[in-house]
Image (tube, rainbow, N blue to C red):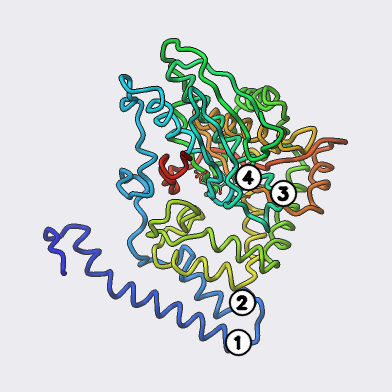
Amino acid sequence: MKKDYPKNSLRRRESKLEAPLQASGVMLFTDFQRTYSKCPHRPFQDCPTATKIWNLCFGKTLLFCHRKTDMTAKHSEPQLQAWNISEDDFPEKGSLVEKLQFMLGYAILAPSSHNTQPWIFKIVGNAVELYADRTRALPVVDPDDRELAISCGAALFHLQLAMHHFGYEYRTELLPDPLDRDLLARVTVSGKTEQKEDALFYAITKRRTNRLPFEEREVSGKLLSSLMAIAQKHHAWLDVVQGDSKNAVADLISEGDRTQMSDKRFRRELASWIHPNRSQSRDGMPGYAHGITDDIASYIGPFLVRTFDIGRGQAAKDRQLAAGSPVLAVLGTDADRPVDWINAGQAIAEILLRARAEDVWASFMNQPIEVPDLRPRLRDALGRKSGLPQLLVRMGYGSEIKPTPRRQVGDVLAD
Ligand SMILES: Cc1cc2nc3c(=O)[nH]c(=O)nc-3n(C[C@H](O)[C@H](O)[C@H](O)COP(=O)(O)O)c2cc1C
């Protein structure tokens, strides 16, 4: 049915443009396919015509791009509603179970690799148990479930922060059952004090992985020192990459991109977690999270990632992003056991929230850690003789972006 928008409204003008733009998007894509299938150039970046059409689809040259994703909208989409959580809705008069369920609403906003959200929670008496959901593992990029455990560690930190904020005292045990390695943590409520004001807690709903280029503005040494202290508190270390080492690390990131993208299995796995902007999926990464704000282009993204080795283009882009970021930092641990991964997850969650509380954004560039041959070379570039890099992040000031989908607490709560 044709919608009747008010005369001269932006939406009316957009709706008039919608059909021709959708048609032109399809035509551009058909042109791209036709050109690419005929031309002798492989990969397609070597073909000037195909590259031009690609740029038209994805580059800044697309002037009449379809309705942009609105970054400032209230989160009315069902898959984003988890981000609307507010402390005002805390069930003050509810049971402990209801309160714990409410606080889990903050745990599920934690970052996770490919936004797999690989966690399950169980409320047992006055404790919350956190389990690894290995059905959400990423066997190609993360064969040992290392990043899976880090992601769960991040959710664990969010949960404890919410408990602290709402005035609960608690005791946390990591890997409490030697016979059940999926049980990563148990957090037992042990008392109640008054509610706390904490900037870290308020940063939970403001945090996102921001992959856009950052401003040149420096991040203060004071903030960086506090991030390093946070890492130490969680039995980890944070090395800020300085001087020439920054270029060396940026080179490793681009080498990692080329290696990963040349692997069909890696591309297939990644593509299966990338969704069109308008998808209602409650996990995975919408195109806009990777800077594809155009809705039509976001439909083609997963196909392109799955089909073409875009490693060279990605490597060049990431190298520039990394070298141009005000801060490149590596979080590491002294050993590489599940307990170290959970600690690293708690550390990164607190680091990201502390940074966000100071208006600083971050995103991950873990390629040199995920490609096994590059991990020791990254450690060498840091000038370390021992220890294991766990995560590589870039940080800086930048513009606001939209959050990514989340499942609801009910979806991740076991009976
Ligand atoms: C352990 C871990 C590894 C990650 N690795 C990468 C990465 O290599 N590249 C990247 O762009 N994002 C990476 N991310 C970010 C996730 O893709 C992101 O957290 C997820 O899509 C949810 O989005 P959000 O952080 O904006 O809530 C990683 C996150 C975690 C926790």
User: Residue 384 bears which disc, if any?
Assistant: none
Q: x%, y% of residue 4?
A: 12, 63
Helix, strand or loop under label 2: helix
Residue matched to label 2:
44
Q: Are marks 4 and 1 in contact (CB under 8 Å)?
A: no
Residue matched to label 1:
39
Q: Amino acid at mark 4?
A: Leu
Q: Amino acid at mark 3?
A: Asp
Q: Amino acid at mark 2?
A: Phe
Helix, strand or loop under label 3: loop
Q: Are marks 1 and 2 in contact (CB under 8 Å)?
A: yes
Residue matched to label 3:
144
Name the image quarter holding the N terminus.
bottom left
Mark 2 surroundings within 10 Å by alpha-carbon count, few (fewer than 14), some (14 through 19), many (20 or more): many
- Residue at image location 55% in from the left, 28% down from the top: 354
Q: CA distance from mark 4 to mark 3?
A: 9 Å
Q: x%, y% of residue 255?
A: 74, 58
User: Residue 148 bears which disc, if any?
Assistant: 4
Mark 3 surroundings within 10 Å by alpha-carbon count, few (fewer than 14), some (14 through 19), many (20 or more): few
Q: x%, y% of residue 348?
A: 62, 34
Instruction: Determine if the C-beta at disc 3 is less than 8 A from ligand 1.
Output: no
Toward the right, the furthest residue is 385
Of badges 3 and 2, the one in the foreground is 3
346 vs 292: above or below: above
Helix, strand or loop under label 1: loop
Q: Nearer the viewer, residue 230 or 246?
A: 230
Q: Amino acid at mark 1?
A: Cys
The answer to whether residue 343 is left or right of residue 412 is right
Q: CA distance from mark 4 to mark 2?
A: 34 Å
Instruction: Determine if the C-beta at disc 4 is less than 8 A from ligand 1.
Output: yes
Of badges 1 and 3, the one in the foreground is 3
